[in-house]
Image: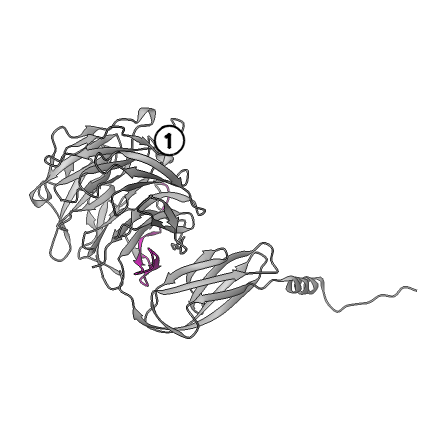
Amino acid sequence: MTWSLRIGLNSASILFLAATALASTPVVTVTSPASNATVDAPVHFVATATSPSCSQGISAIRIYSAPGVSAYTVSGGQLNGYISLANGAYNTTVVAWDNCGGVGSAPVAITVKAQSAPAGFLYVTNSNWSPNTTSTVNNVIGYTIVAGGKGALAQTLQGPVTTNIFPLSVASDKGGYRLYVGDYASGDVYAYYIYGNDGYLYPVPGSPFPVNRSVTAVAVHPSGDYVFAARNEDAAGDGIEVFEVQSDGSLVQAPGSPYATENGPRTMVVDPSGKYLYVGDDYDYLEAFKIGANGSLTPLPGAPYAMTGGGECGVNPNDIIDTVGTHLYTADRGDNSISGYDINSSTGVPTQISGSPWSSEGGCDPYVLPSLAFDPFSLAIDGTGKFLYGLNGDIESISIFKINQSTGALTWVQDTTNTTGMQPGPIRTDPTGNYIYATGNGGIVVYTINHSTGALTASPSSPIPVPETGNAYWTSFAVAPPQ
């Protein structure tokens, strides 16, 4: 006799029950803030998640500031970050997902009573523009530099602010009162007021201001009275547009502007005294101008100066930095090197330093297009002026050099890598010069600088998420000091 047992479940139901029985549930532990605590904003969240039943571990952790309102997301099982919240009561929730389909959460009720004074702001420009597509993402995103947070950032509550097409460069004035964005595809400069309490941006009257040529760099005079824009289409007619800043913040083309350069002005910097403007050209020239009345530009004796060391690859300076007015450095992405120049204190004329250029990750590779090498892509100098940092985007590292305080010569110290990787993008210090911000694959990476050795230590809050929409990428940073 054959017996049979019929179960009143179909195969889909059996699979559902099996999956439910095997599903894991992550355990979320929040150590900051304490539940029912009264705190100041930005609010520091520290949480961990584990999933004992899932050998593949935790996929991500997210903070919800309210039901359905995502405020902060990181990959992996560790979260250490800040979120901006207005004053009031919040029923926040920290949620974790594991790699087996499980979800766990922990509620955290808090009351925000006050807003901490910012230690400055970081602004990131984003775009998904390319010559063959219609750009739909063109914006700038603001972050508060958290006071006492060791360089930590909290995205402002304003969210992305619209720019014109393909914002490629950004700079603030010395006082942190205004922000200027150079738009490459639309060929203009967008000017914003920076609201010092929260970092919000508001367009100045008349923005954007036409340059009528692709803009690859913007720089602001230390006085705040002039804004310089690099006009770059790698063709005759390239040069520097000079704007005078009006009392209402609007920009007016200065008399005599634009001023001619060699083709392809890529990057520029004003020396700290405000006397000189230095420009790096795509075709391996260093331009130098004396800044006069109304922002007028007069080439220095012998300018432009041919840059050397490029070989087959060319030099292709992509970034230029001058923080103390005695030495100038360029990030030579074509030559995979850094060039250094001594600045004559009387005339402003640059002279290449003995030993320059210094290799940053391997030197010239004629089989790699200079536009793809990105080694180094951008430069920063610590607050003591002792160390220079070059972000190597193609090989995902930061090269650290010690600066000879007398001669300006560089000595390689070490390369720093990060598990988030590096993107070809900017590297900048905070207003104190104690922390560095760099582009990583997971967001903005924050490093603490050891001023004795130059070594970099990644902050526990890294990487800090950057909202991405429509495959946008981060083109530049500007750091504005507190007002």
- Report x, y in % for residue 130: 35, 43
Q: Residue at x 32, y 38 (%)?
A: 401
Residue 63 occupies which quadrant of the picture? bottom left
- Report x, y in % for residue 451: 30, 47
Q: Quadrant of the N terminus?
A: bottom right
- For badge 1, the amino acid type reads Leu
Residue 369 occupies which quadrant of the picture? top left
- Report x, y in % for residue 245: 13, 51
Q: Main secondary structure of the magenta part?
A: loop
* Residue 118 sits inside the magenta stretch: no
Q: Return the residue found at the far top.
A: 311
Residue 127 visible from this viewpoint: no
Residue on which disc 1 sits: 369
Q: Residue at x 33, y 34 (%)?
A: 333
Q: Residue at x 29, y 66 (%)?
A: 116
Question: Relative to the observer, which residue lies in front, 402 or 133?
Answer: 402
- Report x, y in % for residue 446: 36, 51
Q: Residue at x 43, y 50 (%)?
A: 442
Residue 264 occupies which quadrant of the picture? top left
* Residue 139 sits inside the magenta stretch: yes
Question: Relative to the observer, which residue lies in front, 408 or 97?
Answer: 408
Residue 307 versus residue 55 in the image, above or below? above
Residue 401 visible from this viewpoint: yes
Q: Which residues are magenta?
A: 132-160
